[in-house]
Each structure stands twice: as structure tokens, then as C-alpha cells.
Amino acid sequence: MPGRIAVSVTRSWAPTDKDMFSPGTASLRARLTSIGLSRLVLFLDFDGTLVPIARRPELVRMDRAMIRILDRLGRHVPIVVVSGRPVKDLRRVIGLESLHYIGLHGFSYGAPHNPPSWLASRPPRRIVRTWKDALVAVAEKVQGAWVEDKGISVALHNREVAARDRHSLHRNAMNTLQDRLHGKQIRLLRGKHVMEILPATHCDKGSAVLRLLKRPWARSRVPVYIGDDITDIPALKLVARSGVAIQVGSIPQAPKTWTKLVDTDAVRDLLRYLANQLDRTSAWPSAVPVQRCS
């Protein structure tokens, strides 16, 4: 048999001043290390957590450095990207088929190398189209407002709306939807500069995370959830019971006990640190380059 080949791995990362002094980073590293990094399962929100929020969803791009970090981390611990976006959109932007994906606020799940499946029943498309038509009629009257059809949900965006017009946009949307709300035909989900109509079925990021935590690959692991928006609160509250809940920036109504990272740069620094530590403790670090899916 040929002898073992000695592998030398060059470490290109060194802590920056910003990374070293990011609020909460040092204590968070210590806490995760005390748990045991190889015992973790990571649930990561997308917009505002892994990538900065863009003016429009389709303008978001993930840099190669973050893709490499996720690829390295995913070789050691399960990673689940959680988002209001469809799974196919997340895979297109991130390009890693080896990750787990929760899409559409918990309605959809994509296992590694598998097509998405539904975690809850879907409304008929004809019903969703009536929601879209109702919101389009409201949005057309306000400059900068626009409507996104996600297939099973419809979102009204106001990021490009003048601050003075946002209240009236919200009021008009609520007036348009009040009959459906009172009849429990729909439920509303509010996020940063967005209002989304969803099926009345109870399904959110928290319920989806709970379902995945019961899967064999996650059952014995300690969950970590990182998120930046009100829509992440159900999952953050769930994970805080048995794992580590981390908020990015400020989330209204978030408990003060949650660990806080300042922004997406701090998230990247933390994930890179975890990847470096896990690479060091791995007997045979993989040298396979990142393979982006088409």
C-alpha cells in the first residue's frame, strides 16, 4: 500500500479588528465551542442574515467568500437555509445543492440533491390570483409599491415607497383584505418593508424548523438559529428553548436575552470562524472545490 500523503492546509483567514470586537461575538464563540461545534445544526435566514437586503429580491447576489464558507461548514454539520423565498430561488442564488432549504416561510422544504416538497397544503392558484389582483389594485395607486407573486403567497413591497405614503398604502391594503381576514381565508405576515398574504394554514419558520429537528440527521444535534426579521421570531423562540437563538441587528419584540450580531458581516465572520475550527479538528480536511449547481 502507498504511504499516507501529508496534507498541508493554508489558513487564509485572520481575525480583523471588526471581527474581534463585534458585540457578542467572543462570548458567542465561547458558548458554541463549549457545546461542541461538531454537534451543531445551523438554521440560517437568508435576506438580511447571509446577504444584505437589496432594493429588490432579484438583485441579491451572494459573494464567493460566503459560498465557500457555507460549503466548508456543510461538510461538517447540517446547514438549513430558511427564507420566505421559494427553494428554487435560494438554490439559484447560493448554488449549493448539498444544503437543506426551507422556503416560503415554512411551506416548502428542499432536502440535499432533491426537489422541493410541501410541508403544508397549498391553496389553488385561482385563489392566489385573486389575492394578487387585490394587492396590485392597491399598489398601482402608490409610486414605488409593487407586488410579488410567489406561487402560494403574494407580497406587497414598500421599500421604494416614500415614507409619507407607507401608512396610506398599508391602510388601503388592510381595507381591501379585511373581509378575507375576518373570514379566516388568509393570514398576513409582516416583515421589513413587506406585507405578505399567506394561506390561513398555520405554517411558519418555527413549525418548519421543529419538523426538521425531528429528522434523524438533526435529532441529536443542538440547534442554532440566526435571523434578522420579525418573520424569524417563531423559529428563534423555538430554538432558544434547547439551543442558541441569534438575532442580527434589531428585531422588534425580540427578547433581550437573545445574543445579537450587528450585521451580515458579523454573521460571515462567525460562520468563517466555525468553518476554520471544524476544518482544524477534522482529520482529513476536504480539498474539493466548490461546485455550483446550474
Image (cartoon, grey):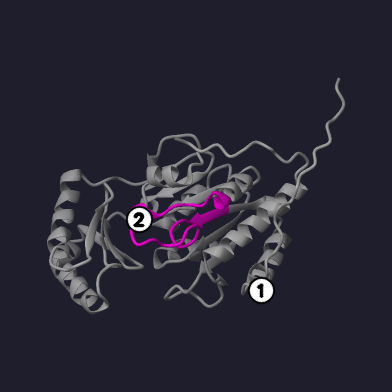
Q: Rate crowding at label 1 as few (under 14), some (14 to 19) or many (20 or more) other CA atoms within 10 Å.
A: few
Q: Is residue 72 magenta?
A: no
Which residue is located at x 72 percent, y 47 percent?
279
Instruction: Report the side of 138 relative to 265 (left or right).
Output: left
Q: Which span of residues is magenta-colored?
A: 42-66
Is 26 above or below relative to 287?
A: below
The residue labelled by disc 2 is 57
The numbered dot on residue 78 is none
At mark 1, the secondary structure is helix
Which residue is located at x 30 percent, y 65 percent?
194
How many numbered marks, from 0 up? Answer: 2
Q: Nearer the viewer, residue 106 or 133?
A: 133
The residue labelled by disc 1 is 21
| Picture quadrant where residue 216 is located | top right
Res 84 visible: no
Q: Rate crowding at label 2 as few (under 14), some (14 to 19) or many (20 or more) other CA atoms within 10 Å.
A: few
| Picture quadrant where residue 204 is located | bottom left
Please tell me which of labels 2 and 1 falls first in the chain: 1
Q: Is residue 50 magenta?
A: yes
Hey, what amino acid is under mark 1?
Phe
Residue 15, x across and y down, in percent:
70, 64
Q: Quadrant of the C terminus?
A: top left
